[in-house]
Structure formats: C-alpha cells, structure tokens
Amino acid sequence: MQAITLLALLALALPGQAQVDDDQAKIKLAEFKKALKTVKTDADMVAALTTLGESQNPKILAEIKGFLTKGNAEVAIAAAEMLGKYKKDKDAAEALVGAAGGRKEKDVIVKCLRYAGDTEFRAIAGKLAGFLRHRDVEIVHEAVDSFAKLKAKDGIDPLLNLWKELDGIQDNVKNNENDGGLGATIGGSLTNSMQ
C-alpha cells in the first residue's frame, strides 16, 4: 500500500502540466491577463499562452480555447499545443477539431488535428473522418495519424474506406485511366509507405 502511495506522489511531482484547483486557476488567469497587457509581439503572446498552459483546469482550458480562433497562426498553434496536453478531455478535443474545420491556414489545421489526436479522446473519431476527404495531402495524413493515436474502433471503417478508394485510384493510375490527381498522390504515398 505504501508503494502505491509513493508512486502516486511521484507521479504528481513529475514536471509537465499540473492539475490545479479553481483558486489556483484564478490566480494563473489573473497573471495571464496581466501579462496580456504587456504583450507586444506574437512571440510574447505565445510565451504567455505557454506559461498559462503549464497548469490544467477547466477555466484555463476555456481561456486557451478562445485563442484557437483569435489572432494569427502562431498564436493558434500555441493554443492548440496547450490543449493537446489535456488527455481524454472532451472540451479540448472538440475545440481542436472544431478549430481545424474553422481555420484556413494549412499549418494551423495540421497542428489542430495533431493535437486533437494527442488528447486521445476517442469520441472525436467521427468528426476526424471528414478530414480524410480533404484536398490537401498533409491534412489527410495528419487525420490518419490522429486516428492512430485515438485507437478508436469508430475510426476503422473510415480508414478502410479511404484505403479502398486510394487503392482504386492507384489501380486507375497504373492503367492510365486517370490523370493521377490528388487521390493518386495520396494513394501512391500511402501504398509506398506500406511496402
């Protein structure tokens, strides 16, 4: 019993994000809002978000979520990274997938998908499936990687359907029935990576 207690205490002492209570979260948020008054560059904003993101609390999560849609790509990516550390958290995972669908910048979409997978919240598998049909190869690739991180049974059918579709496109390209297009690019890269 003492060994289990010791292991639990060691786990709490490890560096990284720490779960904080509401009073500590209020203090962290007040410090963050004070830091916002001195922010002059995007790098300053990223640093402030990173400092806030060192602690986990629903109130902190709510504050960080707002930065997924505000400002430029660098700030949104920093917010996404902080939310990706909220393991098994529905709000963080859904905010990341929502931001991926709402942003225009490819880098932000890719990072949001990556960090959505990092949350390991399996219920977002259905929402990720839509990104398997995106026209950009990197976005599709990141969606596939996020499915792998989720290890959700709801991801099997969409991934199999993608594989079948890409396999058919690859066959058409080999038979010169198609000009290749994006599907051939994705199909070729997936087929080549599996060999």
Image (cartoon, rainbow, N blue to C red):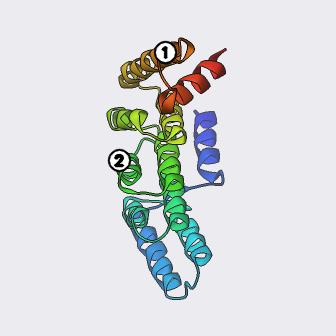
Q: Nearer the viewer, residue 153 or 134?
A: 134
Q: Nearer the viewer, residue 88 or 72?
A: 72
Residue in the image at 65% along x and 22% along y: 193
Residue 45 sits in quarter: bottom right
* Tag 1 secondary structure: helix
Q: Of callouts 1 and 2, which one flags the residue occurring earlier in the amino acid sequence?
A: 2
Residue 85 in view = no
Residue in the image at 42% along x and 62% along y: 68
Crowding at dot 2, Cα within 10 Å, few <14 / some 14-19 / many 20+, comes out as some
Q: Which image quadrant: the N terminus?
A: top right
State the separation of the CA atoms marked 1 and 2: 37 Å
Residue 76 x %, y %: 48, 63
The residue beneath circle 2 is 94
Residue in the image at 35% along x and 45% along y: 90
Q: Is residue 108 left or right of residue 10?
A: left
Question: How many tags in the picture?
Answer: 2
Residue in the image at 59% along x and 81% along y: 41
Residue 2 x %, y %: 61, 36
Residue 46 sits in quarter: bottom right
Q: Which numbered mark, 1 or 2, is in the foreground of this view? A: 1
Q: From the viewer's perspective, is residue 162 above or below residue 79?
A: above
Residue 179 x %, y %: 50, 26
Crowding at dot 1, Cα within 10 Å, few <14 / some 14-19 / many 20+, comes out as some
* Tag 2 secondary structure: helix
Q: Residue furthest bottom?
A: 38
The residue beneath circle 1 is 172
Q: From the viewer's perspective, is residue 40 above or below residue 148?
A: below
Amino acid on which disc 2 is placed = Glu
Q: From the viewer's perspective, is residue 163 above or below residue 42?
A: above
Tag shown at residue 154:
none
Amino acid on which disc 1 is placed = Asn
Q: From the viewer's perspective, is residue 152 above or below residue 107?
A: above
